[in-house]
Amino acid sequence: MSKERTLILVKPDGVRRHLTGEILSRIERKGYDIVELKQLDATREILEQHYAEHQGKPFYEPLVEFMLSGPVVAIVAEGERVIEGFRSLAGSTEPTVAAPGTIRGDLGRDWGLKVQQNLVHGSDSPESAAREIGIWFG
């Protein structure tokens, strides 16, 4: 097999709660390499590109507003089956039911807000990873 790359985002709730180091540690303990890393304030332009497939859906604007609410840490991680592996490590997008031992299961919860604040994003396919890495890292 060949190594894959994936985009991982620590969302504003993870940065705000000082969980970036814990999340990076879990990625590295899983055996993946961090090949690029930066903290930034996302722009509406970046988010419109990143979430293009969700435009027009009821949760789109609350999601964009949440992602604009604070800094984001963008990560390119590399490793064998890293896309599948990180999504497993992240856990269900619904923190309330995410399995213990996952990032969202251990560190996330439902805050009763308009949009689920679930700490991290991970690309869902090699095609998405390539597109998303291009958006966030140029």
Image: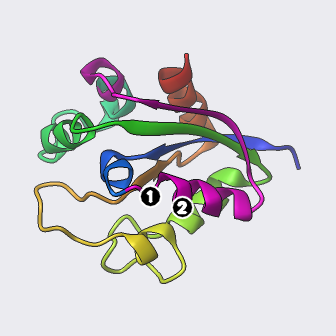
Check whether the beta carbons of the residues at disc 1 and disc 2 lie within 8 A of each other: yes
In the displayed structure, 128 sits above or below 101; it is: above
Left/right placement of residue 9 relative to residue 62 reads right
In the displayed structure, 68 sits above or below 113; it is: above
The amino acid type found where label 1 is placed reads Leu
124 in magenta = no
Q: How is the image coloured?
A: rainbow
Question: How many other residues sit within 10 Å of disc 2, few (<14), some (14-19) or many (≥20)?
Answer: few
Report the disc number at residue 121: none
**Residue hosting label 2:** 22
For the point 54% across and 79% down, the residue is: 101
**Residue hosting label 1:** 19
Spot occupied by residue 99 in the image (x, y as percentages of width and height): 47, 81
Left/right placement of residue 123 relative to residue 68 reads right
Magenta range is 18-47
For the point 34% across and 36% down, the residue is: 71
24 in magenta = yes
In the displayed structure, 98 sits above or below 123; it is: below
The amino acid type found where label 2 is placed reads Glu
Splitting the image into 4 quarters, where does residue 24 fall?
A: bottom right
Spot occupied by residue 3 in the image (x, y as percentages of width and height): 82, 44
> For numbered disc 1, what is the local secondary structure?
loop
Quarter of the figure with the C terminus? top right
